[in-house]
């Protein structure tokens, strides 16, 4: 028995995933949840995985920010620190795109990972100088006062694989151990965020029916049974659609895909 959640009328092609378009549903994949955030919800985790997998930005650098022995237990203070560091990076590096996410260490302290689209430099002295500036900036922003923290409070590393950041972020989204909010931590706020340029944009949109999509993914091991609705996002299925399109299309009125709707 099919669920009454709106007839499938099309599909959006992204870098790695497909987004099913249903009649009468919202046209994008934005997470519109509002209200106080108390946990890293499944919906938010899936949204992070989608953004990381389909962003047009190639991330080249990861910076990790940790706190000294004494750390804030109010998420508002942590986000103020994060905002100040993001502003410092923009001043130091100029315009750049980023993706960040929050975790909690075993001791309960928050720490933050940031993915950036710039290179930290190939020359040893250039990399060392940037790493030192990062450490000094974070040390001052959090008013650390701990010399050990100045040396070990940040980590800055080059991402050597094209999809390294996406894989890391997706792994993070499914690793729940470090997502539990400590009992004494309040106002956790968002677990992740990104700059405007990171937002995924569809390559194309195609008209199709539910039968068309089910035929496309019929041998996909995660495809739902016929009595369950197709998922809103078909993860890692973009290449399957590209291969189908590359094989040639029947341009008659009974064609599965009629082509991009902007043509």
Image (tube, grey):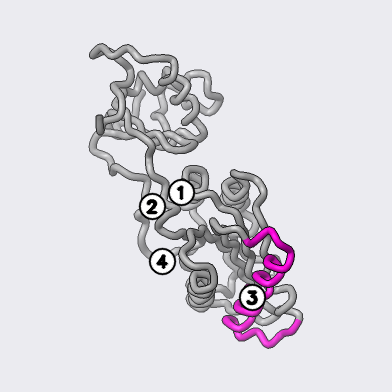
Q: Residues within 10 Å of mark 4 (few under 14, many from 20)?
A: few
Asked if the magenta segment contains residue 138, the reply would be yes
**The C terminus lies in which quarter of the figure?**
top left
Residue 263 against residue 246 in the figure, above or below: below
Characterize the local packing of mark 3: few (<14), some (14-19) or many (20 or more) Cα atoms within 10 angstroms: some
* Identity of the residue drawn at 54% across and 72% down: 92
Dot 3 or dot 4, earlier in sequence = 4
Q: Secondary structure at mark 2?
A: loop
List the residue tagged with mark 4. 36
At 64% from the left and 65% from the top, the residue drawn is 64
Numbered circle sitting on residue 31 = 2
Quick one: label 2, few (<14), some, or many (20+) residues within 10 Å?
few
Residue sitting at the far bottom: 145
Question: Which x, y percent locates residue 242?
Answer: 45, 25
The segment highlighted magenta reads 120-147
Prevalent SS, magenta region: helix
> Distance between the Cα atoms at labels 3 and 4?
35 Å
* Mark 3 vs 4: CB contact within 8 A: no
Image position of 181 with respect to 206: above or below: below
* Mark found first going from the N terminus, 3 or 1: 1
| Front: mark 4 or 1 | 1
C-alpha gap between disc 1 and disc 2: 7 Å
| Label 1 environment density (alpha carbons within 10 Å; few <14, some 14–19, many ≥20) | some
Res. 234 visible in picture: yes
- Say which element carries label 1: helix
Residue 261: give x, y in percent of width and height. Answer: 26, 31
Q: Position of residue 43 (x, y in %)?
A: 45, 49
Report how far apart the C-alphas of labels 2 and 3 lie in the structure.
35 Å
Residue 47's disc number: 1
Mark 3 lies on residue = 133
- Does 181 sit left or right of 55 as displayed? right
Left or right: where 35 falls relative to 107: left
């Amino acid at each position: 028995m099919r669920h009454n959640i709106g007839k499938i009328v099309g599909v959006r092609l992204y870098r790695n995933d497909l987004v099913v378009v249903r009649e009468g549903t919202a046209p994008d994949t934005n997470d519109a949840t509002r209200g106080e955030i108390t946990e890293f919800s499944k919906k938010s985790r899936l949204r992070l995985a989608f953004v990381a997998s389909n962003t047009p930005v190639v991330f080249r650098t990861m910076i990790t920010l940790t706190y000294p022995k004494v750390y804030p237990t109010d998420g508002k203070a942590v986000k103020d620190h994060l905002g100040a560091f993001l502003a410092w990076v923009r001043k130091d590096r100029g315009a750049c795109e980023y993706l960040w996410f929050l975790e909690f260490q075993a001791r309960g302290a928050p720490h933050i990972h940031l993915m950036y689209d710039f290179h930290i430099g190939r020359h040893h002295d250039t990399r060392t100088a940037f790493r030192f500036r990062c450490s000094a900036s974070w040390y001052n922003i959090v008013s650390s006062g701990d010399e050990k923290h100045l040396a070990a409070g940040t980590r800055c590393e080059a991402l050597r694989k094209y999809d390294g950041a996406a894989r890391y972020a997706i792994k993070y989204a499914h690793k729940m151990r470090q997502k539990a909010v400590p009992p004494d931590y309040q106002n956790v706020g968002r677990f992740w965020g990104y700059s405007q340029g990171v937002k995924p944009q569809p390559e194309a949109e195609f008209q199709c029916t539910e039968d068309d999509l089910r035929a496309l993914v019929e041998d996909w091991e995660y495809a739902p049974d016929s009595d369950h609705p197709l998922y809103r996002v078909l993860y890692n299925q973009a290449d399957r659609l590209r291969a189908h399109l590359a094989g040639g299309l029947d341009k008659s009125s009974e064609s599965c895909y009629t082509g991009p709707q902007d043509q």
